[in-house]
Amino acid sequence: MGHAAEKIVEPERMKGKEYRKHLRRLQTELCKLQEWVKYKGLKVVVVFEGRDGAGKGGVIKAITERVSPRVFRVVALPAPSDVQKTQMYSQRYIPHMPAAGEIVMFDRSWYNRAGVEYVLGFCTPDERERFLRVVPSFERLMVENGIILLKYWLEVSNEEQARRFQARIEDPLRQWKLSKTDLPSREKWFEYSRARDRMFEASDTEECPWYVVHSDDKERARLNCIDHLLKQIPYGKVPREKVKLKERSTKHAYDDRASIISRRVVPERY
């Protein structure tokens, strides 16, 4: 007699206070990583992919909230122009690659060709397959040129994606998130699933593996992703000179507060 399938028990949603405590600790470590990347001249690329509504933007925002945009650069490219459509496919991504001391995060990347472009008919099946044949070599070239490449796929369930899309429809503060590709992505769920599976089959390599982040619980997904990212780039403490705040000099002193009184002031309503 067969055994009944075990029911998967989902962990409780993380409380806000606990989430903020863990996030602050991880963001402190991201600041240390930032200093190390600058100190050692490292070059890092982090790719975030996933279905519409999977939470890519939220993860990126949690990473970048407390660090310098000069070190952590976010790249979210619009649809290609008519000129870019005639170029070599990877050409428009190459100018955004990091220089020494930079971490570049792609909010969607060259993998558009394997996912949204293919599913929505913006490229042909042959173009998709050509991309998948070439992409391991493209990424190997990045690694050989000293780039640390990390690839994250945020996996959201059908039910949670539907809930998030409905919230975008109803909440005026979220409606800007509802792109013209969101609703077709609901209808084409299984087409996206097959595209994802084919993408993993072709590009989940030993040199440049994919890491899957379960993202139904957005708070846990952000924490888990940041924790994993930190573990992929060994970093240490950067030697720093002790900083001492100097007193204000009274040389050339004048009543600088009085000189501002006659200027236009924003009403203090709050």
Image (cartoon, rainbow, N blue to C red):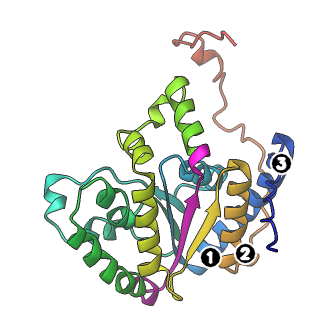
Q: Which residue is mark 2?
A: 238
**Amino acid type, callout 1:** Tyr
Q: Check disc 1: other Cα within 10 Å, few if <14, some if 14-19, many if 20+.
A: some
Placement of the C terminus among the 4 image quadrants:
top right
* Horizontal side, residue 13 vs residue 74: left or right: right
Q: Which residue is mark 3?
A: 12
Between discs 2 and 1, the one toward the N terminus: 1
Placement of the N terminus among the 4 image quadrants:
bottom right
Between discs 3 and 2, the one toward the N terminus: 3
Picture disc at residue 39: 1
Residue drawn at 41 percent across, 73 percent down: 198
How far across and how far down the image is residue 197, in percent?
46, 70
Q: Nearer the viewer, residue 133 or 253?
A: 133
Q: Which residues are magenta?
A: 142-160
Between disc 3 and disc 1, the foreground one is 3
Residue drawn at 58 percent across, 17 percent down: 260
